[in-house]
Amino acid sequence: MTKKCLDEIPYNEHRVFVTWENCSLRQWLNNEIFNTAFTDEEKASIISSVLSDKVFVLSREEVLKYLPDETDRQCIPTEYSLNRGTYVNDRGLCAWWTRDSAPNAKAVYLSSY
């Protein structure tokens, strides 16, 4: 799991209602990211989730469960993501996508602004 913003990617490339199952973010994570960000050894050690995904974003409930303290949920952008246009607030934090994010909305802010 990473708490850093790795890239600036929309929940879905088209502004239409889709669920996590059909969103372009899920496809990007399980294809491009899985195939380029991990070595063959790392890929072999990654098990599929209940969702049949190798790489996925947490649900809002999972974020709050596994990262209960606000400071644990602060999302810090990488230099790469900043170069790609990631929005950060005045504290230098960016937002999270969750599996249950509204498809037409911006990412969810789970750390205080």
Image (tube, grey):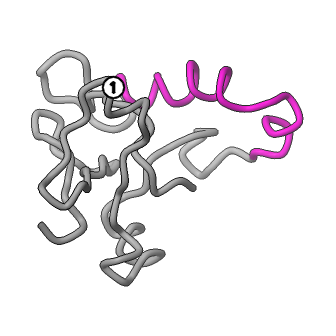
The quadrant in which residue 44 appears is: top right
* Location of residue 87 in the rendering, given as x and y in whole percent from the top left corner: 18, 39
Observer-nearest residue: 31 or 110?
Answer: 110
Does the magenta segment cover residue 28? yes
Vertical position of residue 24 compared to residue 81: above or below: above
Which image quarter is the C terminus in?
bottom left
User: Would you name the residue on which mark 1 appears?
Assistant: 83
Decide: few, some or many residues near mark 1? Use Cα within 10 Å; few <14, some 14-19, many ≥20. few
Name the side, left or right, on which 110 lies relative to 83: left
Does the magenta segment cover residue 73? no
* Location of residue 10 in the rendering, given as x and y in whole percent from the top left corner: 26, 28
Count of numbered labels shown in the rendering: 1
The quadrant in which residue 62 appears is: bottom left
Observer-nearest residue: 96 or 91?
Answer: 91
The rendered magenta stretch, by its main secondary structure, is classed as helix
Vertical position of residue 10 compared to residue 42: above or below: above
Magenta residues, as a range?
A: 23-46
Residue visible at 75% across and 45% down?
46
Tell me which amino acid carries mark 1: Asn
Which image quarter is the N terminus in?
bottom right
Name the side, left or right, on which 92 lies relative to 74: left
Residue visible at 24% across and 68% down?
111
* Location of residue 88 in the rendering, given as x and y in whole percent from the top left corner: 20, 47
* Location of residue 60 in the rendering, given as x and y in whole percent from the top left corner: 31, 63
Residue visible at 54% across and 45% down?
51
Name the side, left or right, on which 23 lies relative to 14: right
Identify the residue at the far bottom of this view. 69
Q: Secondary structure at mark 1?
A: helix
